[in-house]
Amino acid sequence: MSNKSVKDSVLSAISDANQFLSDTSKIKIDESSIFLGFESNIDSLGAVTILSSVEEYIFKDFGIHLNLLELDINKYANTEFATISSLIKFIKNKIRG
């Protein structure tokens, strides 16, 4: 397990995933950035790309396997996945159990 924080892992994952997204779908690497929901410019493929990258980073950095892609993304779009900050908080809570 690394000494990285969940925040570092999530931001690194987004940075990596942004390489595969169109310019209009890229997410600004900032905790206040909109991720999903009404004001998001990301499509479902972009969301899957980013969440998959987050899963990989969390496993690599913490040895914990998250199943973010098995969640109903629409259910969390305007709450836990609305911003990068809320996504980080959601993941921290999942890791704590």
Image (cartoon, rainbow, N blue to C red):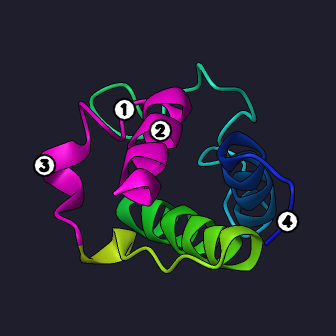
> Which residue is rendered at x = 65% and y = 41% of the image?
27
In the displayed orientation, state which residue is furthest to the top.
Answer: 32
Q: Are marks 1 and 3 in contact (CB under 8 Å)?
A: no
Where's residue 33, x and y in %? 58, 25
Q: Earlier in the sequence, mark 2 or mark 4?
A: 4
Q: Earlier in the sequence, mark 1 or mark 2?
A: 2
Task: State the residue position of label 3.
Answer: 75
Magenta segment range? 71-97
> Of the residues tagged 2 and 4, which is closer to the observer?
4
Task: State the residue position of label 2.
Answer: 35
Where's residue 21, x and y in %? 67, 62
Marks 2 and 4, how far apart in space?
A: 25 Å
Q: Nearer the viewer, residue 59 or 74?
A: 59
- Amino acid found under the numbered disc labelled 4: Ser
How packed mark 1 is, by other alpha carbons closer than 10 Å (few <14, some 14-19, many 20 or more), is: many
The kind of secondary structure element at disc 3 is: helix
Q: Is residue 52 left or right of residue 74?
A: right
Q: Are marks 1 and 2 in contact (CB under 8 Å)?
A: yes
The image's mark for residue 2 is 4
How packed mark 4 is, by other alpha carbons closer than 10 Å (few <14, some 14-19, many 20 or more), is: few
Where's residue 35, x and y in %? 47, 38
Task: State the residue position of label 1.
Answer: 82
Q: Are marks 1 and 4 in contact (CB under 8 Å)?
A: no
- Amino acid found under the numbered disc labelled 2: Phe
Determine if the magenta segment contains residue 58: no
